[in-house]
Amino acid sequence: MVKLSRRGFLIGGAAVVGTVATGMAIGVGFLSTIDTDGLSGSVLPDGSLGLTAWITIRPDGHITFAIPRTEMGQGIHTALPMLLAEELEVSLDYDNVSVEFPTDPLPVYANFTLALGKRPEDAHGVGAWVGRKIFGMVPYIATGGSSSTVDAYETYRKAGAAARNMLMQAAAKRWQMPMSALYAELGEIVNRETGERLGYGALAADAATMTPEKNLALKDPKDFRLIGTSTPRLDIPDKVRGAAMFGIDTVLPDMLFAAVVQAPVFGGHVKNLDSSKAEGMPHVHKVVNMGNAVGVIADSYYHARKGMDALMIEFADGGNGDLDSAGISKRLKAALDGKPNHIHENVGDVDALLAKGDTLEAEYETPYLAHACMEPMNCTALYKDGKAELWMSAQSPLAMTWAAKEVFKDLSGGTVCHTTLAGGGFGRRIEKDAAVFACKLAAAMPGTPIKAVWPREEDIRHDMYRPAARARIRATLGADGLPTAFDYNIAVQSTLEGFSSRNMPMTQGGPKDPSNVEGASHLPYAIPARRVSNATVELPVPVGFWRSVGHSNNGFIVESFIDEMAFKAGMGPFEYRRKLLAGNKRLSAMMDKLAEISGWGTPAPEGVVRGVSFRPSFRSHVAQVAEIRLDSEKNLKVERVYCVVDCGQVVNPDTVTAQMESGIIFALSALMYGEITLEDGAVQQSNFPDYDMVRMANTPDVVVHIMENHEEPGGVGEPGTPPLFAAVTNAIFTATGERIRTLPLMNQGYSFA
Amino acid sequence: MPDILINGKSIPAGDDPDMPLLWLIRDILKMTGTKFGCGIGACGACTVMVDGVATRSCITPVGLVEGKVTTIEGLSAADQTSAVQAAWIAEQVPQCGYCQSGMIMAATALLRENPEPTDEDIDAAITNICRCGTYPRIRKAIHRAAELTRDMTRGGVANG
Ligand code: FES
Ligand code: FES
């Protein structure tokens, strides 16, 4: 398959050279691309025509969409093409379009929403301009933070409109007709007067020389043809045939396979290595000591694993051999007992209000969690003549090129990351650790592609975990039972600090990392006095982004505590939330819808108990009701989850529904089983039996309702996860009076019925 | 070692009878539709059929394989998707898709044994892990595939 290459990208008709695949700026040519909007035409090396940076049309009419966001299950390789196709006026069928992740890191491919925390169209002013320049220059190509659709919503529709306009100009010229006599329809430009039609393929070459008109009007939402419809996913036909290629499926000529074993204790390293036996084994090519890990290169992963088993390795523990879960729990407690090191929100006189009235207080504790993507961590690397090439299911090809820089001194030939489909990401695949190992192995055998695959045991033991946390909450209730003061403090490691220290040029985060408290700060609930703070701790356990990040901890804790307050006030949990949201029309409508579809307020079926929870995150709002059955032996069945989501303008409703189902089941696994514990400095869990998952038999029915409106789009990959935790534990409280303040449930004697 | 019959082709089984079938398929034959998830028989990502029975290839030594092996690539004859695959598309099941080859093989084996499975039958037979949580759609797709197969059989175009 010919890979998209846009090295010959045209700007105002002149080819700009000097872009290098490493993404670093060289020469004026590259810098001049930063201000462009990616809307020019180009001729690509394979003869197809680029109409904007996102759309390529072959002379036979086949369209390829260049989508610089990683498809990891969230449906983005359908949703973003829908935005382009809406304005381009083409249908979106598996047979007439394809989707590729472009390998050229063009500035316009940067994810500005993720980088700046703002939609590109909202990024006004000098600061935003500079930010766009910087992140465009890097360029910051990454998939995460449920930001892809938010970032693309306007940019991609504009690109589709620009390409259509170029095609119409080409047709106008050919027919010698004014543009007003033409319209675009399903891949053709139609001549209104003669009824003649010209296909996009036939027009593309001429269109690529046109400059799109400025300020093209975008469609009114009521005229949307694709956006808002459940368009079948473009990636599914390959996925049901086993033809979809994930990073781990990379096959290259003369490729060898490697398995990796890392120092079990965080911060540890290889002290002694005797690889003689392994190296003497048939099919084993090489054993590579990478300092903190050892890789075995062989003719297959099986042979590499066999070689690994024959290694004699002594690891040093880097001074962390004493670390264990009990000790970490003590550290979190001690941090809570000390002073907060940052106050994120401080409104009203919290202390004065806490001193009087009806107060309540609770502490919650949550465990570390692993991502356990279905596709174990892996990366294929080839180093040849100063050029590093990577094949990887990466959430950020940019970070992977940095990994190559860390390893190879001579990169005069450049670095390319081929981003494949990802077998799950959930935040794990934005880390560059697997790429570093693959590069080190490739460095040991220049000219030979090496596919490094982590055994599942390594994948679980060397994750960047959702941080464990402990929070203390205090509140005062007024005469009406509603809270007058809310004081929240959480002891936790900063994920942003962990992530940035490992992956970015600069370390950020720490006590001021907003994700420490996201889900507790700036609550939509009307509480007059609020203080939200954290006491961050530094621990050797690597922490990173795990689906919904801080919301997974804080959402569970806050939504449980809201129920505690409701109970104390003698009010129903649903009614209580409604009162707290009364001033907010949009959220009230969502809660009303949830009550309606879940039948809240009407008697539940015999033996069924309900719990409710609500959590805005990533620009969307999700509320859920869980229906559970529980027997006296704590056998739990989550029978059904009702889920209402308001994510603004919906692009693909069926994808939104799927992401809600997914987020709910992901959270249910964590709720029941999820915990990573440490002993003697090492993670105790290693594979699915001891880091277990919900399966078919434990899966609830999920009923999803999407609120319809044309508000700004929000994310959907993560927001389904946070509410589920408390929806279930609140139901458990209603059923038994037992308030769950420590997770996972299996440690509290619960199991699935 | 005798050859192994994979998707109708006779394949040399190599020099190591202990090698799990998964790695013969993936790394030696370079057929990447069958996936590696856990390597210990716990997740089902590597499921293939041996004489129609769902088998976790990561814990099945090639030396012990007796019978015809079918992988996901062998399920659809010449671009004709099987009823199970068609149902999977109709229900828009896959998300990341990584577990789906194994799921489809497990579902195909179930339907061969039991053409009209109940929800309880599905719970008992489908023990594979999907981290994306596509289980509700898998359940629907299995029922739909059962229906499709029934209709096709009634119409005289058996294809299972
Ligand atoms: S890889 Fe075989 S069961 Fe998991
Ligand atoms: S679809 Fe991603 S693991 Fe099942």
Image: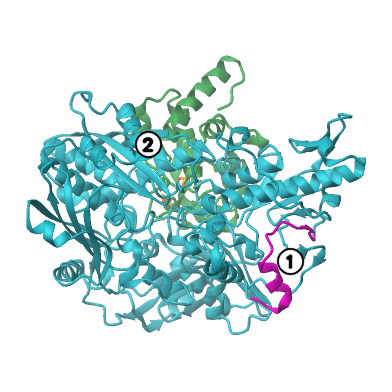
Chain colours: A cyan, B green
The CA distance from mark 2 to mark 1 is 45 Å
Q: Is mark 2 within 8 Å of ligand 2?
A: no
Mark 2 sits on what residue? A644
Q: Residue at x 87, y 30 (%)?
A: A193
Residue A180's disc is none
Is residue A441 shown above or below A577? below
Q: Residue at x 82, y 63 (%)?
A: A13
Nearer to me, A566 or A693? A566
- Highlighted range, magenta: A25-45
User: Disc 2 vs disc 1: which is toward the camera?
Assistant: 2
Name which quarter of the figure residue A352 lies in.
bottom left
Is residue A112 shown above or below A18? above
Kindly tell me whether residue A660 is visible in this rendering: yes
Kindly tell me whether residue A450 is visible in this rendering: no
Task: For the C terminus of chain A, give its image quadrant.
Answer: top left
Image coordinates for residue A697, horizontal then vertical, percent: 32, 36
Pointer 2 indicates a residue of which chain? A
Callout 2, which amino acid?
A: Val
Image coordinates for residue A382, horizontal then vertical, percent: 62, 71
Nearer to me, A691 or A450? A691
Residue A7's disc is 1
Pointer 1 indicates a residue of which chain? A
